Image: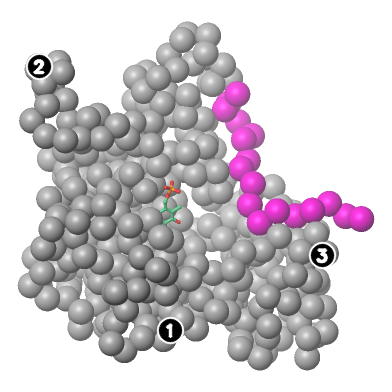
Amino acid sequence: MSEQIPVSAPALVGNEKEYVIDCIESTWISSKGKYVDEFERGFAEFCGTSHAVTCANGTTALHLVLEAFGIGSGDSVIVPDLTFVSTANAVRYCDAEPVFADVDPETWNIDPEHVAELADQDTAAILPVHLYGHPAPMDEITAIANEHDAVVIEDAAEAHGAQYKGETVGSLGDAAIFSFYGNKIITTGEGGMVVTDDPDVSARVRHLKDLAMDQSQRYYFEEIGYNYRMTNMQAAIGCAQLEDIDWHCERRRNIASLYNKHLPDLPEITAPVERSWADHAYWIYSIILDDSVDRRRIRDALDEAGIETRPFFPPMTSLPPYEAYQPETPNEIADSLSKGGINLPTWAKLDEGDVKRVCEELETAIRQGR
Ligand SMILES: *Cc1c(COP(=O)(O)O)cnc(C)c1O
């Protein structure tokens, strides 16, 4: 019996342990410390932005950045229907209304034509997601946002190091957020970051994540803030991961090219695309099965063969909290991708043998279902 291949696993191959031990030995284990400062400085440099602010996770990063732009009741925020739930939830945390756009059938990212139709005088922000690591069409989104005086916030939780027309994601919108959850491209266990060139937004995020305490008057608060801070121990892991980030990104692109090489050439399978203007981060290499295939059965067969997979995210408008947000015309592309999409194992330490095994089992499972 060969070993189980998980869909994802962190690769802690550098100075992670040394830096965490340093936190413990120095007693700097809370949310102040050199690793927090260094992680913020280094990550801003990586993204090419002037500011970066750590926070507890990607979801809190979304909440903080929306609030920092003053988005609230009466505002609407256009988000893709196909995303992880945090993108939509953060809009609701601010008491604003998410508006769900359909996605592109090939890149799976927010469809700018639909965004243009949905944008109106209430649109305060557009929140494209670089889904599974492929950059969203930022020029088109930015043009629509400019027409409506809306800000653009990138949800780059899945796309560390992805490039759009040669620019690193995170530097393309008015601000961006990243996640460092255990399965993301680099991790701090739990963690998040807001990056921006706007000093006011950065300062506001920093203020809100620290309970909005007055800087000159301890325990004086003008407003209700949050404790969304990252600890020095998490940032210590982040610093070590950041030292190796080029390797982490390169590994994922390498694994994707192995999948492209070994993926069975079957009409039932659609492989991910990478637009000519894009450098895909391949957070998770994913495929779409056509509707002749029973996805559940394929996933079960792979599971029995020791290969873990995940289904695509469901469209947000199919979930109970967002039932009331269902558009008059359903977001058909999001629906259909969501039904056929499978995430295949993608993480730094997979080798060509693993990828071949996944592809062979996939081929067997599909052929058996015919
Ligand atoms: C992971 C993820 C988030 C949330 O990040 P957490 O750190 O898990 O809170 C937000 N948006 C997208 C698209 C994600 O994949």
Q: Give the quarter of the image for residue 32.
A: top left
Across and down, in percent, residue 327 comes to 29, 82
- In this view, which residue lies farthest toward the right? 1
Q: Are marks 2 and 3 in contact (CB under 8 Å)?
A: no
Which residue is under mark 2? 217
Q: Residue at x 32, y 35 (%)?
A: 228
SS majority, magenta: loop
Q: From what the image shows, is residue 132 above or below residue 266?
A: above
Count of numbered marks: 3
Q: From what the image shows, is residue 79 above or below residue 52?
A: below
- In the shown orientation, is residue 172 left or right of residue 352? left
Which label was assigned to residue 293? none
Mark 3 surroundings within 10 Å by alpha-carbon count, few (fewer than 14), some (14 through 19), many (20 or more) = few
Which residue is under mark 3? 304
- Dot 3 or dot 1: first in sequence order is 3
- Dot 1 or dot 2: first in sequence order is 2
Query: Quick one: quadrant of the N terminus?
Result: bottom right
Indicate yes or no whether the magenta region holds residue 224. no
Q: Secondary structure at mark 2?
A: loop
Q: Is mark 3 within 8 Å of ligand 1?
A: no
Residue 193 vs residue 118, the one in the foreground: 118
What span is in magenta?
Answer: 1-17
Query: Quick one: quadrant of the C terminus?
Result: bottom right
Which label was assigned to residue 333? 1
Amino acid at circle 2: Gln
